[in-house]
Image (cartoon, rainbow, N blue to C red):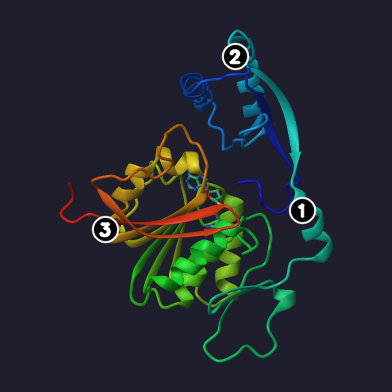
Amino acid sequence: MGDTLGVTRWPALLLTWPSGVDRDLIELTLAHLDDFQPTAIQEDDQGPWRVFFASPSSREAAHRELADRLARQGIAISPIDVDDENWAARSQAKLTAVTVGALIIAPPWDLPVQPTPGTIVAIIEPSVGFGTGHHASTRLCLAMCQRLDLRGRRILDVGTGSGVLAIASALLGASAVVAVDIDPDALESARTNAARNEVETTIQFVVADFRSAALHPAEIVFANLTGIMVGAALDRLIDLTTPSGFLVLSGFTADEIVGRPDGPVPSTPRGSLVDRLDEDGWRCLVLQRTLPDA
Ligand code: SAH
């Protein structure tokens, strides 16, 4: 998602529309771009859009394949590296603890000295894994952890990153947590963080792509990914949620266009939207899986 510590520049394409562009051309262009799996699209009513990619090579592939085709429609694309504007401030100030409700997510160097009774402290050392509590999408999921009652529940954390949501779930009383990530380095840091919080026996770590791995459905599933990933894998994520269980989705902005007019989480007969939280333009949605399954 680009907030991983150590990443300071995001590969993107700047996309300039011709004047009077219509919705059909936008949809068609997004469909072309989708083949290159952009991680996020930042639209702008007035100016060019930014289309982000996971790596410079995927950005270059999209540029190479699409530049001529789009130019014929009057659309210009050019590669840019977007600065992570918060990065300098964050690295200079060093990360400090973040409070979300009763949870404090703290780096080892900023542990609360005397937490008030009822406070739950999760120690998360910022490293390769995304999820320090400094991104709004993580905070929204942490807030949802506390709106849902996790005690005694089986949890699946899809894209665990630093392990922050898995660890918070275990500390909030979940009986068993499975934490999945495609990135072995992230998973290693999640494992270390779990041990720091003495919840490593509650959490099972799995290095895998959640879209194809053999995973058991869980009563509560967290998926803080990207809008495009959530939109494309929504059915799979619902499959991974037990009937009447909850699917907590984030990693997209409130106005994100991901190739569907109704955003990454269309209403579906398989799940109904039961909760929503917004922060800094980011959104978190909770679907409850329909019972009986349609
Ligand atoms: N859960 C954390 C981290 C979210 S970042 C938080 O809420 O802050 C998203 C994570 O999803 C990244 O660590 C990334 O490696 C992982 N991810 C992306 N695609 C994945 C896939 N197909 N299967 C499993 N993990 C994936």
Q: Tag 2: Cα neighbours inside 10 Å, few (<14), some, or many (≥20)?
A: some
- At 36% from the left edge and 74% from the top edge, which residue is drawn? 149
Q: Secondary structure at mark 3?
A: strand
Give the CA distance from mark 3 to mark 2. Answer: 43 Å
**Image check: 154 left or right of 120?**
left
Residue type, mark 2 in image: Leu
Along the polypeptide, which appears first: circle 3 or circle 2?
2
Residue under label 1, please give it: 87
Residue 106 on image: x %, y %: 66, 73
What number of labels is visible? 3
Which of marks 1 and 3 precedes in the sequence? 1
Q: Which residue is mark 3?
A: 242
Residue occupying the far top of the picture = 72
In-image side of 142 versus 150 (left or right): right
- What is the secondary structure assignment of the residue under circle 1? helix
Callout 3–callout 1 Cβ contact below 8 Å: no
How far apart are labels 1 and 2 at the CA level?
33 Å
Question: Which of pointers 3 and 2 indicates the residue nearer the eye?
Answer: 2
Q: Does mark 3 have its CB less than 8 Å from ligand 1?
A: no
Q: Which residue is mark 2?
A: 70
Callout 3 crowding tier (Cα within 10 Å): few <14, some 14–19, many ≥20: many
Q: Residue furthest right?
A: 92
Above-or-below relation of 132 to 109? above
Task: Specify whether residue 163 is in view.
Answer: no
